[in-house]
Image (cartoon, rainbow, N blue to C red):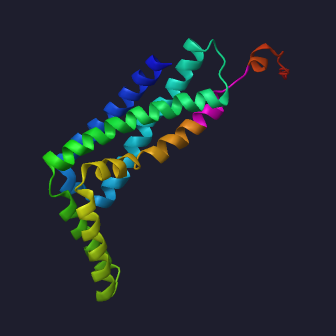
Amino acid sequence: MRKVVFTFGLISGAIMSAMLLLALPFQDAIGFDRGAILGYTSMVLAFLLIFFGVRSYRDNVAGGTVRFGRAFAVGALIAVVASVCYVATWEVIYFKLAPNFTEKYQAHMLDKARANGESDAAILRRKAELDKFAVMYQNPAINAAITFLEPLPVALIIALVSAGVLSRGRKDRDAPSDFVPVA
């Protein structure tokens, strides 16, 4: 199981990390809103490897059968490995390659609030919240924890779906088929 988890987790993590690094030079042109769409789309594509990892485990390690719980565990572990790669890449980007990310994000959020017609008092409250978040986000442990929570829900949903689709017990394999061809 370990080989399958690390193989598919590292490939998935490499895809997400590559997308982060490829998008970095274009972050101003892409913008935060389109960047989120691009980011989550690339996560979904990278996490499709969870399906293939669970299938590989079922077919090559588990002898063609795997219960839902084991299939979900394999998928979740692949998700964790991929998410750790994503977090490691983001930590390098945030602290070394894009140290002004928080300021740009704050400016974007405040501009968005102004464009939505929020009152000056609401904008000041939002600025205070963003300032508090910026201080908290400078702590690498908190930064990593928050970043880890970005891809994980998407990955766990894909792991659940993959486990549901790919799990099958022994009776499924040994039972005669009820399929009758229609002429």
In the rendered image, the vertical position of residue 109 relative to residue 138, given as above or below: below
Is residue 71 found left or right of 38 in the rendered image? Answer: right
Foreground residue among 5 and 46:
5
Foreground residue among 180 and 145:
145
Picture coordinates of residue 116, whole percent (x, y): 35, 79
The residues colored magenta run 161-169
Is residue 169 found left or right of 97 in the rendered image? Answer: right
Task: Give the image quarter of residue 162.
Answer: top right
Q: Is the magenta stretch mostly helix, strand or loop?
A: helix
Identify the residue shown where x is 65% and y is 34%: 164
In the rendered image, the vertical position of residue 48 relative to residue 183, given as above or below: below
Q: How many marks?
A: 0
Identify the residue shown where x is 38% and y is 38%: 83
In the rendered image, the vertical position of residue 69 relative to residue 179, given as above or below: below
Identify the residue shown where x is 79% and y is 19%: 171
Picture coordinates of residue 59, whole percent (x, y): 58, 15
Picture coordinates of residue 100, whole percent (x, y): 15, 58
The answer to whether residue 38 shows anywhere in this view is no
Identify the residue shown where x is 29% and y is 52%: 143
Is residue 89 found left or right of 49 in the rendered image? Answer: left
- Magenta stretch holds residue 102: no
Which quadrant does the C terminus fall into? top right
Task: Give the image quarter of residue 82.
Answer: top left
The answer to whether residue 82 shows anywhere in this view is yes
